[in-house]
Image: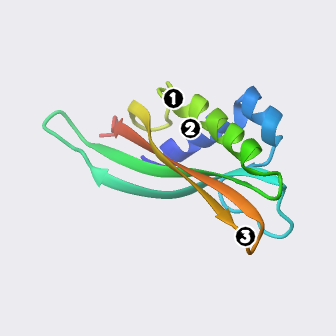
Amino acid sequence: MGAALQEAVFGAVQADVALSALVGSDIFDQLPTGKVPPLFVTLGTEAVVDRSDVDGKGAEHRFVVSVIGDACGFAKVKAAAAAVSDVLVDADLTLTRGRLVYLRFDRAVAKRDTRKNLRRVDLRFVARVEDNHS
C-alpha cells in the first residue's frame, strides 16, 4: 500500500492552494536534477512496519516530506513546511488500495547547509493504513 499512500500524499500536497502560493508547481516525488528551484518540496524516505492484526492486514508508514530552499532563508522554508503540515495532518486521503486510518505529524528537523547555502526542513509523518485487498 506504500505506492497508494505515496500517490495520495503527493496529490494532496500538489493540489493545495496555500502551498502552491509559496512554492508554485515545484513539488516533486524525488529530488530534482539539474538546476533546482529556489524553494521546493520533495517526498523523502519511508520506513514501514507491519501492523496486521486479527481483523486484517495493515501497516504503519513513517515518511518524510522535505522543504528545501536556497538563500531565501528559513522564514520561507518554514512557512512552506507549515503549509505541508496543514495539508497532511489528519488528512482524509482516498487511497487506490487500502484505507487510511490516520495521518499525523511526528517531528521536524530544520537544517542549514552552509556549503551549499541551503535551508531544509524535514517533516516526518506517521500514517496507519489497512489493506482492503484480498
Identify the disc placed on residue 94. Answer: 1
Which residue is at the front of the view, 125 or 46? Answer: 125
**Amino acid on which disc 3 is placed:** Thr
Residue 2 higher or lower than 96, as above or below: below
Q: CA distance from mark 2 to mark 1?
A: 7 Å
- Label 3 neighbour load within 10 Å: few <14, some 14-19, many 20+: few
Where does label 3 land, which residue?
Answer: 114
Quadrant in which the C terminus appears: top left
Q: Please give the name of the residue rendered at 49% of the width and 42% of the height, measured from the top-left corner.
A: 5
Residue on which disc 2 sits: 8
| Residue at left offset 83%, top offset 58% | 71
Q: Nearer the viewer, residue 33 or 22?
A: 22
Q: Earlier in the sequence, mark 2 or mark 1?
A: 2
Q: How many circles with numbers are drawn on the protein?
A: 3
Q: Which comes before the other along the chain, label 3 or label 2?
A: 2
The label nearer to you, 3 versus 2, is 3
Position of 24 with respect to 6 (left or right) is: right
Instruction: Report the mark closest to the observer, 1 or 3.
Output: 3
Based on the displayed image, in which of its 4 quarters is residue 57 positioned? top left
Who is closer to the viewer here, 20 or 3?
Answer: 20
